[in-house]
Amino acid sequence: MSTGEELIALVVAPGTGVPPGSGGLAALVADEWAQTGPAAEILARAGRLEADRHPRWVWWAASTDAPGLVRARTRPRRCWDLAEVHRLLHGGWEAGPAVVWAEAHGIPTAPPPPPSEDLFAFAGEEPRLADDVLVRPDGHLRPDAVTGAWLTTPERLVAWGRAALVVAERQRAELSGEGPRALATAHAESAAAVLCVELERDGLPIDRARAEQLIAASAGPRPATEEEAAAARRERDRLVLRHVPCRESTDLRNPAQVRELLAAVGVDVPTTRKWVLDPYRDTHPVVDALLRWRKAERVSSTYGYRWLDTAVGPDDRLRGRWTACDGAGGRMTAENGLHNLPVDLRPAVAAAPGWAFVRADLGQVEPRVLAVVSGDAAFAEATRADDLYAPVASRLGVERPVAKVAVLAAMYGQRSGAAGEALEGLERAYPVAMAHLDRAYAAGVRGADLRTFGGRLIRTGRFLADRPLGSDPALDAARGRFARNAIIQGAAAELFKAWVATVRAGTAALGAEIVLCLHDELLLHVPEEHAAEAAEQVDRSLGAAAHWWSGGAPVRFVSDTSVIHRWSEAKE
DNA sequence: TTGACCACGTA
DNA sequence: CGTACGTGGTCAAC
């Protein structure tokens, strides 16, 4: 397929001790030309090229080659991320240049090529690689290029950029054999990877005073010294241990000791997990005190003052590393609490003065995704409703909560609970969708690979380890559940990223920053005067992204979109 | 020091 | 608790 796109590789030599892109060399490499020089100069040139020609940027990985560009406020519209496309095509998470190159050339990636600096090799056993040669006789990249140590001259950087273009072409050819959506998925995945760099640059706006206040309410005032911190900890412990006078030396952080303590007061439990202990809250006061203690302990250990001091910058932005896809279904991940901030702390996430948030989250995204990926016309019909469980319930002749449990049970394989009869109803009403889930489960059980709707390879063999298929029924079932979940969760992640990429492109002119991506939820930070328009753009983007992602399937996706000033507002 | 496990926050 | 993630705690093995 000829796209008519201009591909330009951007490669940046890893600087020594400086942020990527700010020192050392960089290169722009296209089919017909190349330019190298100091990174600052090359990045400025790249900025002009972006403005004039909006090429598709090719890089080994946005996290290594794009930060300089992103820091310079160039917003690349189109890119091709070799690492992300590799993950899409071949599954798993490992996607360094060595394995990406090898896989693109169909040469074995394991065992990894040995270190070339043959300190321990006998002289003459392996011909020494000429200094200017990037590709070894065995077809692998020279290892010191992969680590970046070799990328010290303009000529070498150009070779590195050429290699990136070679891989991009091979990946594109391979993708064309993976169905109509794979190429579009590659573009969206690549956009998500550069968005991750932008998310790390911008951070999530925090109202620091409010955060301090919320932490204090749970963990007490900020301790001035180590001794004060220890005293506060002892005081928190005491509020639990006072209920068990004889066992005041119990270490509440040690589950075994806690279990012993509980047994002594007549609470006999297999584990001390919250949902196990919950029913015993009224049995003995120590249970309730313990569960309250756990909550406070969580805030003080994970989301306490240390977190505030290290993860929130002097500009009051919470920053963490972002990745465009995990190793399984392909959802985005984030560190430093960006993806698991307790709801109680969310009032501290606040727009800056003069700015607002546009918050949007997809409603019932997974069943709607199931309607697309399975091609079930009857189930697609149900997605026309704002609440798809309502038409499902009426079709099954059950109450809405029953229908909901049944749909979730079908998708996730819930074994507890009594969804049995409703499940049978689902099989009759939506046989196409149910068969799709069953096939994924069966593929997982037999350890077969499968692909998501957008073309991502799901390798169920990762659970196999060295145990033969069928040797452990529990393991087989676990693979089945994993596979069934991955095709839904993975496809939902693809739709989400298509949506986000569309929003990113469509709201740039409004000065909007995407500041949080949370699987089915999106938070934009926008100048107040453009917030309403950005919100409309978010909704329009969903329609557009869903349409092309689904290939025009008659499936409706809905977003709850609102303009707010704290993340905690306007939540269901 | 490292890896396993627990526990728990989010979707 | 269906799956997925990241974090911080303890423990046993190194």
Image: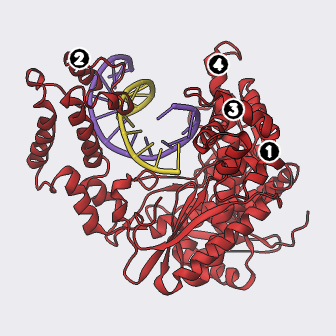
Chain colours: A red, B yellow, C purple
Q: Quick one: SS at disc 2?
A: loop
Q: Is residue A227 above or below residue A120?
A: below
Of tags 1 and 2, the one toward the viewer is 2
Q: Quick one: SS at disc 3?
A: helix
Q: Residue at x 45, y 52 (%)?
A: A335
Q: Are marks 1 and 2 on the same chain?
A: yes
**Which amino acid, mark 1?**
Ser
Crowding at mark 2 (Cα within 10 Å: few <14, some 14-19, many 20+): few
Question: Residue A266 has which mark?
Answer: 2
Give how far apart the Cα atoms at labels 4 and 3 are.
35 Å
Q: Which residue is mark 4?
A: A466
Q: Earlier in the sequence, mark 1 or mark 2?
A: 2
Q: Position of residue A462 (x, y in %)?
A: 65, 30
Give how far apart the Cα atoms at labels 1 and 4 are.
33 Å
Q: Quick one: SS at disc 4?
A: loop
Give how far apart the Cα atoms at labels 2 and 3 are.
39 Å
Which chain is indicated by disc 3? A
Q: Position of residue A395 (x, y in %)?
A: 74, 44
**Which amino acid, mark 4?**
Asp
Q: Foreground residue, A390 or B6?
A: A390
Which chain is indicated by disc 4? A
Of tags 3 and 1, the one toward the viewer is 3
Give how far apart the Cα atoms at labels 2 and 4 are.
43 Å
Q: Residue at x 67, y 21 (%)?
A: A476
Q: Earlier in the sequence, mark 2 or mark 3?
A: 2
Q: Which residue is mark 1?
A: A374
Q: Position of residue A495 (x, y in %)?
A: 69, 57
Q: Which residue is mark 3?
A: A423
